[in-house]
Image (spheres, rainbow, N blue to C red):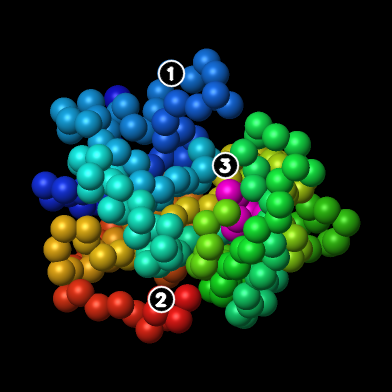
Amino acid sequence: MTPLNILYQDEHIVAVHKPSGLLVHRSALARGETEFLLQRLRNQLGKRVYPVHRLDRPTSGVMVFGLSSEVAALLSDTFSERQVEKRYLAVVRGVAPSEARLDYPLREEDGTRPKADMPAMPAMTDIRCVDSVELPVQVDRYPKARYSLVEARPLTGRRHQIRRHLSRRGYPIIGDAKHGKSVHNHFFAEKLGAPRLLLAATYLTFDHPMGEKRIQLSCALDDTMTALFHHLGWAGHLPLDSVRTPPHTTPSALKAL
């Protein structure tokens, strides 16, 4: 089994690139699954690890774990108090706006209660169109197909927030079986070699729970998305694996939240 790509590790935390399609941990909604990120990372490091945030199963990208329950609890507080900046890259249908704030309340989707029993919670996502492309093929009812590369910054942490917000605005993420459109998903899978949800967590920055420094993590895309970016002429937007630890500061954008 290929080892997980470790982006950063010290005595308190570890950050890895979660592959698309891999569950983070066991869940009642995923009976029969035998492989989990938590177990693979534990086996690779030879020690227990503790998740502090989540990524959907089909989403790839950077994830942080505590190496003790105490550190994980501190990090969880940091995430819940919006002291973390997260950025994602998504390939969506249509030509997205240059910039927009998506402010649509969302019901929590925990799979255990009827949606009518769940109150809608505030949810905000900032998006920016990084690039777009027009393909000379008819995928749906139009003679040409247009797609955009979008950077998304969730300002809240609702389940499937980016996927649901982009779909509601009219720019569903390619490969999203629940919130997207199957004809475009099939086109990318069969013609462009991209049979997965095209959403990746590429950047994460937060204050280290045990020291006066800020951790900035950038995560490269997997082989599927990298090849797609080259094919669509977006290679110049490919992120790279990198780690920076500038002095502890609280960005003004985060102070305002």
Query: Is residue 163 rendered magenta in the image?
Result: yes
Q: Position of residue 77 (x, y in %)?
A: 36, 56
Instruction: List x then y, in percent, for residue 199.
Output: 53, 53
Answer above or below: position of 112 versus 246.
Answer: above
**97 horizontally vs 125: left or right:** right
Residues tagged 2 and 3 counted as in contact (Cβ below 8 A)? no
Amino acid type for the residue under numbered disc 3: Arg
Cα distance in 3D space between marks 1 and 2: 38 Å
Label 2 element class: helix
- Whether 126 is drawn above or below 242: the answer is below
Q: Disc 1 or 3, which lies upstream in sequence?
A: 1
Residue 254 tag number:
2
Spot the residue most to the right. Answer: 141
Q: Nearer the viewer, mark 2 or mark 3?
A: 2
Q: Is residue 170 visible?
A: yes
Which element carries disc 3, helix, strand or loop? loop
Q: In the drawing, does residue 193 fall left or right of residue 15?
A: right
Farthest-out residue, top:
32
Q: Quadrant of the N terminus?
A: top left
Residue topped by disc 3:
196
Mark 2 or 3 closer to N-term?
3
User: What residue did someone put label 1 on?
Assistant: 34
* Part of the protein shown in magenta: 159-165
- Look at label 2 and name its amino acid: Leu
Residue plotted at (65% across, 43% down): 109
Q: Position of residue 62 (x, y in %)?
A: 36, 51
Residue 160 picture location, percent across and down: 60, 50
